[in-house]
Amino acid sequence: MSYEFDSHKPIYLQLVELFSQLIASGAWAAGMRVASVRDLAMTYGVNPNTLQRALSELEREGLMFTERTNGRFITEDQQLIDDVRQQLAQERVGQFIQQMSALGCSKDELIKLIDQKWGEENVTDRNQKS
Amino acid sequence: MSYEFDSHKPIYLQLVELFSQLIASGAWAAGMRVASVRDLAMTYGVNPNTLQRALSELEREGLMFTERTNGRFITEDQQLIDDVRQQLAQERVGQFIQQMSALGCSKDELIKLIDQKWGEENVTDRNQKS
DNA sequence: ATGTTTGTGTTAAGTGATTAATACAGTAAA
DNA sequence: TTTACTGTATTAATCACTTAACACAAACAT
């Protein structure tokens, strides 16, 4: 039940990435209320300050908005969410291709590797928010 | 001519990754002598201590060995180099698949994205060591 | 012998991330 | 009013990373 962070990368950035994914994939639906800073901090086992820093970042990007004394909510701008999803996907594909070609990997070789690995990583379901 | 590092990740780890790639891809050939710590530090614009930390890590992995007062060399164990290349590729493919499926990306959608992006990232040559 | 280059080690300083421990203001329900 | 919850802000302490400025031992060329 405890979440694991890469000790070599700021936690708040890993949280930003994680939450962005949850929003982009729809696991955190548009307009949905988010748990309180303190609760989320407890859930992920980090300091409330660290978690707030991550949420502030997402707010800056427009993915969340806050009602001062009521809580935080996911944006209802579905267009923005779709854009973010598209952007995240593009970034990762680009980075992946660059990394793999730096290893001397051809496009065919790369697709073959994905074909092999897909079965192991992704068994039946696509959403694993548990 | 200056190299850019992600300010949110330790430089020595980024160097380890970079050098691993150079060795795995053969850009740094087996048995080749590596430039001195001081020269490499100058080249990459970092402190010699930081660069030595990266090289020590590669040495720990067996990818390099040192002759005390002569310099460092790439391992001549081609099998090890191939293994590392394979391992790096596997890691990245696995992480990529996990990230993309977390975005709700299907395998076909994923391969389609790669197909599109490959042309932009990789024009004609496969080795881009400047 | 002398100077240069090699890898290696040490010490101190500065920076940023993280945590802990608070405090404050506003809302809602009892 | 009182209580509990919300987001937000501040301060101090700790830790890892990075850099700077050295020093040392061994090999080699002159």
Image: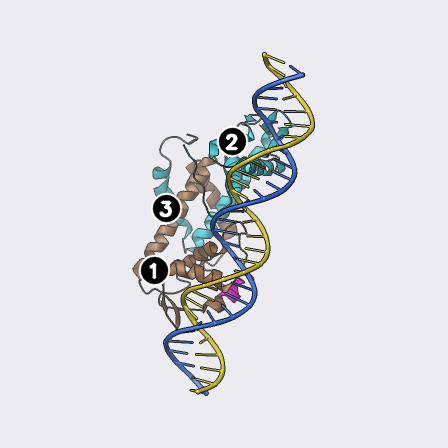
Chain colours: A brown, B cyan, C blue, D yellow
Marks 3/1 same chain = no
Q: Secondary structure at mark 1?
A: loop
Seen at 37% across and 71% down, the residue is A68
Seen at 62% across and 29% down, the residue is B66
The answer to whether residue A42 is magenta is yes
Count residues near mark 3 (Cα–Cα under 10 Å), then give few for <14, some for 14-19, many for 20+. Answer: some
- Real-space Cα distance between discs 2 and 3? 37 Å
Q: Secondary structure at mark 2?
A: helix
Residue B43: percent from left, percent from top: 47, 31
Residue B109, can we see it? no
Left or right side of D29 for B128: left
Dot 2 corresponds to which residue? Answer: B40
Dot 3 corresponds to which residue? Answer: B113
Dot 1 corresponds to which residue? Answer: A62
Task: Please identify the quarter of the rendering in which residue B60 is found.
Answer: top right
Q: Nearer the viewer, residue A62 or B7?
A: B7
Residue A37, can we see it? yes
Marks 1/2 same chain = no
Labels 3, 1: front one: 1
Residue C2: percent from left, percent from top: 62, 18
Chain to which the residue tagged by mark 3 belongs: B
Which is the main secondary structure of the residues drawn in magenta? helix
Count residues near mark 2 (Cα–Cα under 10 Å), then give few for <14, some for 14-19, many for 20+. Answer: some
Q: Earlier in the sequence, mark 2 or mark 3?
A: 2
- Real-space Cα distance between discs 3 and 1? 26 Å
Please name the amino acid that badge 2 sits on. Leu
Q: Secondary structure at mark 3?
A: helix
Region of the chain picked out in magenta, as a range: A41-45
Task: Please identify the quarter of the rendering in which residue B77 is found.
Answer: top right
Chain to which the residue tagged by mark 2 belongs: B
Asked if labels 1 and 3 touch by Cβ distance under 8 angstroms, the answer is no
